[in-house]
Image (cartoon, rainbow, N blue to C red):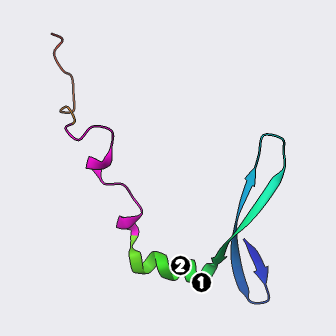
Amino acid sequence: MRQRGKKYYVYLIEKDKDGNVRERYIGPLDKIIETYLNVGLGALTRPLWARRDLNPRPLGLSPRL
């Protein structure tokens, strides 16, 4: 995050295996927060059924067959 005047801007900083740093501009912080509040936390988290198995086993110990 960088401050320019009274505004903040968000950057993604990546480092490759050779140690070279690359920065990508994401957007102004106020717009990112506004989008987050409009979309809501629910859209950013995976629901329980979105894991590997759509038919998970019940929790707890299972008998060996």
Q: Residue at x 16, y 15 (%)?
A: 63
Q: Is residue 1 magenta?
A: no
In the figure, residue 16 lies in which quadrant? top right
Q: Residue 55 in the image: x percent, y percent?
A: 19, 38
Position above or below: 8 against 20 = below
Q: Crowdedness of circle 2 by 10 Å Cα count: few (<14), some, many (20+)?
A: few
Q: Residue at x 28, y 49 (%)?
A: 48
The boundaries of the magenta stretch are 41-55
Q: Is residue 43 magenta?
A: yes
The residue labelled by disc 2 is 33
In the figure, residue 58 lies in which quadrant? top left
Q: Is residue 54 left or right of residue 9?
A: left
User: Looking at the figure, which quarter contains the C terminus?
Assistant: top left
Amino acid type shown at disc 2 = Ile
What count of labels does the image hold? 2
Q: Secondary structure at mark 1?
A: helix
Q: Crowdedness of circle 1 by 10 Å Cα count: few (<14), some, many (20+)?
A: few
**Circle 1/circle 2 CB separation < 8 Å:** yes
- The one of 64 and 21 positioned closer to us in this rendering: 21
Q: Residue at x 39, y 73 (%)?
A: 40
Q: Secondary structure at mark 2?
A: helix
Amino acid type shown at disc 1 = Asp
Q: What's the mark number on residue 58?
A: none
Q: Is residue 22 left or right of residue 61?
A: right
Position above or below: 56 against 6 = above
Q: Residue 9 in the image: x percent, y percent?
A: 70, 77
The residue labelled by disc 1 is 30
Q: Is residue 36 left or right of residue 43?
A: right
Separation (CA) of disc 1 from disc 2: 5 Å
Position above or below: 30 against 20 = below
